[in-house]
Image: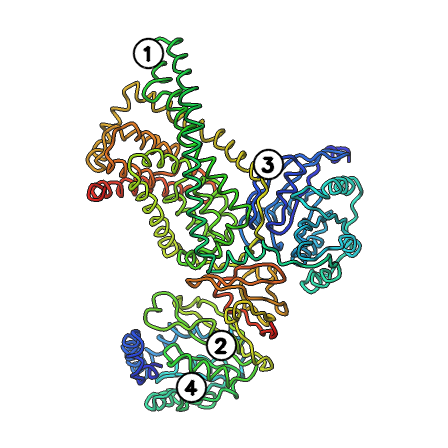
Amino acid sequence: MSAERSRTKRVVMIGPPNVGKSVIFNRLTRMNVGVANYPGSTVEFSEGALRLADSPVKLIDAPGIYTLQPASEAESVAVALLEDAPDLVLCVLDATNLESSLYLLLQLMGLGLPLMACINRTDLAEERGLAVDHEYLARQLGVPTVATRAVTGQGLEELRSRLNGALSSEFSPPAVRPAPSWAEAERLTQQARRSAGRSEDTLRDRLGDALIRPWPGLPAAVLIVVLVFGFVIGVGMGLRRWVLLPFFGELIIPQLVNLVQALLEPGLGREVLVGEYGLLTKGIEWPFTLVFPYVLSFYAALSVLEDSGYMARLGALLDGLLKRMGLSGTAVMPIFLGYGCGIPALMATRALSSHKQRLTVCAMVCLSVPCISQTGAFVSLLAERSVGALAGVAMVSILAMLTTGVLASRLLPGRPSTTLMEIPELLLPRADVLGKKVWARARHYLADGVPAVMAGVAFAALLYETGAMEAVGRALSPVITRWLLLPEEAAVPLLLGVFRRELAVLPLMDMALSPSQLFTGAIVALFYVPCIAMVALVAREFHIRLAIVVLVFTTVFALFVGGLFARLGPLVL
Amino acid sequence: MGRHRRRRGRCAAADPRGYLGQVLGRGALAVERANCRWPRLSRRYGRMFYERLVQEEVELAGVKAGDRVLHVGCGAFPFTTLALAERGCVVVGIDRDEQAVAAARRVVSQKGLDGHVEIRHGTGESVDCADFNAVWVSLHVTPRDEVIHNCLTSLRPKGKLVLRNVAGPLKLLYNATSPAAGATQAHVRTARSQARSNLVTMVAEKLPSTDKQRVVLSGLAAGCRGTIAATGNGHPLLEPLGIRPGRQICLRCIQKLGGSVVADLDGRRVAIDRQLAEQIVVNPVSGD
């Protein structure tokens, strides 16, 4: 008994998608896991330490499930957590859609695990003139129940103390119940519902509905996408020119160069640090002044789209188009995430309902969706030299994405998927949540992306300074100079591009290329190997064979298409 | 089979697939004539193309031995009719081609199935299905929509209509029938055939005729409400999202390009695939 006591107890949070489990989790554990206003934003479980009065507890945030019959791989994760005999299940109910939450609760009651419930989103229910008598439910079902508003933190202290109480008291398994039925869930809902004032058709509701109707939703969608694009590029350029470039380019880097030149004798070490591919010159300039501004502006825009609930609306609007690619409206989320980074995009495919859909989105993201780091690099490379080339790359990318989707849906086995998705309420994003999200993603870039870029630059510096680069350039010259019509040095981006997508672009900047050569280089980079981290994730999430196919296909395809564009480019640009 | 299309010359003009259909129809006719002449060929051909298919259809439709079954478009060598009779059904095969009817009658008496099978001359647009538990409609039968309409209208409640539908490349040759056809009069289920991968079987079970005004969800006008009567077989998320018989649903809008149907269930907005929405049958609620 004592051994069992000393073990850290585990509490699993289960509830329907988009009910606010991750928000409650973040509030209780002071962690910062990703939250967003659409179903399926959590695809993995997260663990966090929860300090209770009596003992520390491990709180586990599970992906949302509608019922205990999983409909996607993300949902299977939640069901698997329940099979792992947690010490307590915290069922998070949705006050606005009580009856389907109650059905899930009834199903959970049949599992014979210690159970507690909290009813979240009571604020949104009140707006609709509804209240839920949680005490009535607690009496009827014999499950301790608390009402909460996770976004403001209301009710969470009570939840904490009730969790403590439930964990320290002896658990007696509930009486055997009949199998849950929708009729019972409906009956309980009717009885637990109380009227709370008048239901108001708010401006939010009307705007939310207008944005899903083809008119004015479709023109609004075009406008929003254009605005987002303009915001990402405009704000990114502004950040670069007025904040990051002055700070790093004029303040930090010259100081470092002076310092190194004062300390080190000329030689290999000094050249690696501040030479052509200097770790302290290019290794800082590239990630911080060329890519980071766009990372910030993109994630600011994406976070607003996610938290407002607009993404799902875009998915519903584009459903007909996605259908032609064998996808459902839900696939909009991973594709959009892919424009930020391919890794979360591949993870988010877990929320899709079929393996075929996952593979299709994976193909699209790996081949033709540039991540924001690469997009930032494209902008830095092309915007000042040739806007036409930048627009050309964008068009080629979109065309390639659509073609990949259509081909994948035709070639991959399996049925086309059917859309059935809940559209979340349109909400005004909260500034503090947005700030935290942008910070979390920026920190991720700083912690994972920047070191990888710097390592790549250091690798290039070593190759360059030892003369190995020249040998590689010569060896690859039939491909690079004869087929791609690029100078021999263009072997550098091809070598480095395997590590990070932006490294397939940035070395081209200082090569004095013609507009047509810039375009060729950009096209090769676009289709070239997605970064090595993504290839590894493809191997983990799908199969090692698929990862090898991705690696080989993207390389061959990028070089092949690059050569074609090298011959077409001079005719246009 | 085949005669329906072959004899209706106007199909060729109205439908680019008509010509191909005619050629195909002639091919099928030639094959059937060959089958009439060489019984050993017919056994092999029947086993190859029909036995497992009919078995699947019988299982899907829940047809039992002793049921009365009508087969529309039985053809000169009525494979489906015979296969149904072998499973203990009392079968009536009809065809609009007199020659085919005569040939089919000879085949039936050769097989010694006179007591179980009757071949009549008639058309799918005019036949009365009230006496039958189930009606089979062959792939070649045209005009399809009118035949389906006639069969569903004249069937008794709980009577079943079994349709062979095409999938895959065969769609270039035949018009596929949408699962939505007849959804207001019947509960429609579809299943891809295991035996013949380019065929889909649709079973429409006639609903009680009390609710005359039923429409499918995508047939409601935007802003109109209805009570869900049936949801078709389908998606595991239908029930949790509140799409269950008896619930009120309000159609918000229909997306372009064959996209989803957005509906409202008790304040919850849901985007529903067009194909799913065409299987959701609602009784419109007036006064909105």
Who comes first in sequence, dot 3 or dot 1? 3
Marks 4 and 3, how far apart at CA = 66 Å
Is residue A445 rendered to the left or right of residue B105? Answer: right
Query: Counting other residues with Cα less than 10 Å from the Cα at mark 3, is it few (<14), some (14-19), or many (20 or more)?
Result: some
Residue A276 drawn at (x, y percent): 32, 21
The N terminus of chain A: image quadrant: top right
Along the line of sight, the residue nearer the viewer: A58 or B285: B285
Above or below: residue B115 compared with residue A167: below
Task: State the separation of the CA atoms marked 3 and 2.
Answer: 52 Å
Amino acid type assigned to the residue bearing label 4 in the image: Glu
Say which residue appears at 45% left-offset and 53% top-offset.
A221
The answer, for residue B49, to whether it is visible in the render is yes
Total numbered circles? 4
Badge number at residue B125: 4
As displayed, is residue B276 above or below residue A439? Answer: below
Residue A3, given in percent of the width and then of the height, sits at 74, 33
Residue placed most toward the observer, A33 or A315: A315
Disc 1 on helix, strand or loop?
A: loop
Q: On the rendered structure, is A462 left or right of A452?
A: left
Using the image, determine if residue A82 lies above or below residue A490.
Answer: below
Left-right relation of A163 to B84: right
Pointer 4 and pointer 2 on the same chain: yes
Nearer the observer: mark 1 or 4; the answer is 1
Q: Which amino acid type is shown beneath numbered disc 2?
A: Gly
Query: Can you tell which mark lies on residue A32?
Result: 3
Q: Which kind of residue does numbered mark 3 sit on?
A: Asn
Q: Using the numbered discs, state the Cα–Cα distance from disc 3 to disc 1 in whole angstroms.
A: 46 Å
Indicate the quadrant containing the C terminus of chain A: top left, top right, bottom left or bottom right: top left
Q: Which residue is mark 1?
A: A267
Q: Residue at x 52, y 87 (%)?
A: B130
Q: Chain of mark 4?
A: B
Residue A570 image label = none
